[in-house]
Amino acid sequence: MSHLKPSSAARISAPSPTPSNASASGAKRKRPDDGTPNIVYSQPQETGTGSHIYTQLTYTVEHLRANQRWMSFKEITDYLNVPENDHQTRHHLTELFRSNNPQNRIAYNPADNTYRYRPKFEIRNASELKGYLQNQKSAQGLSVKDLKDGWSAVQDELKSLEDRKEVLVKRNQKDQQARTVWINDPTLMHKMDPEFQNEWHKIQIPPNPDDLRNSLLAAGLKPSSAPREVVSTKPKEKKRKAPRRGGKQTNTHMANILKDFSHMRK
């Protein structure tokens, strides 16, 4: 067997397993035209019906919230620019507007087929606010932010109610805007006698807290700053039960049959 020289072996190149489409100049060769036409397959159209419907629902909620009045279905569809011949969209909107879902923010009046924004609290004026606060079982206050959702003029009307002593209002320190409102009974508001007020304001509080504390202790009173007495309660030790000795004997009717092991008791 003859051996090739290294120089001659280097000149011999192995054949490529797949033919290359590139020409010697590096340009890509074109495939031969076999006469078969190129077919372009159509893609499904992106209709986006679901997202479109919920977008229309969002616009409706914002529109009703801004107007705060009952509107007919025609007024809403005219605002949304929904054509009358678009029966599918109008049907879906009707189902969404009349949904019993608790998250639905649209109220429906079947008497005249009208719609209105549904806030967190059905309170839109001063009389409805007083009625709600009087009928609730607890004395819990209402957030003015939640009231503003369906009552845009709540800040101004709360000021009038507060001046008439009909409600109690907690305000922010920065902008003095009402934050929380409670019911109030004006019949319980009494004027203090001017002489009592003068005597009250004559009482001077010591500027030093330690002096005030000592004065209370000297009068036999317990100041609020007194340390709280902690009573340590140790858990009671449980008594151990004595081991049971003896016991009620059973099977006495078989005493003549069973073997007696009583002498083996410890």
Image (cartoon, rainbow, N blue to C red):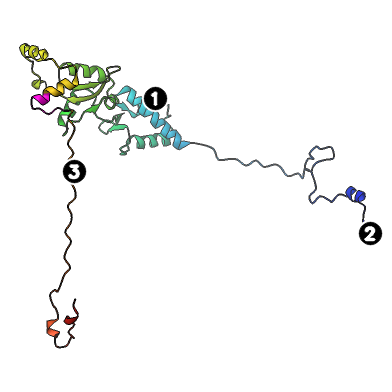
Please state the horizontal and vertical placement of residue 265, each as a whole percent of the image. Answer: 18, 78
Front residue of 66/27: it is 27
Asked whether residue 131 is drawn in magenta, I would say no
Q: Which residue is mark 3?
A: 232
Distance CA(mark 3)–CA(mark 1): 72 Å
Who's the residue at 17% across and 36% down the image? Answer: 229
Q: Amino acid at mark 1?
A: Tyr
Please state the horizontal and vertical placement of residue 105, each as a whole percent of the image. Answer: 32, 32
Who's the residue at 9% across and 15% down the image? Answer: 200
SS assignment at label 2 = loop
Dominant secondary structure of the magenta stretch? Answer: loop
Furthest residue to the right?
A: 2
Provide the residue span drawn in magenta. Answer: 216-224
Q: Which residue is mark 2?
A: 2
Q: Earlier in the sequence, mark 1 or mark 2?
A: 2
Q: Which residue is mark 1?
A: 79
Q: Earlier in the sequence, mark 2 or mark 3?
A: 2
Distance CA(mark 2)–CA(mark 3): 106 Å
Q: Amino acid at mark 2?
A: Ser
SS assignment at label 1 = helix
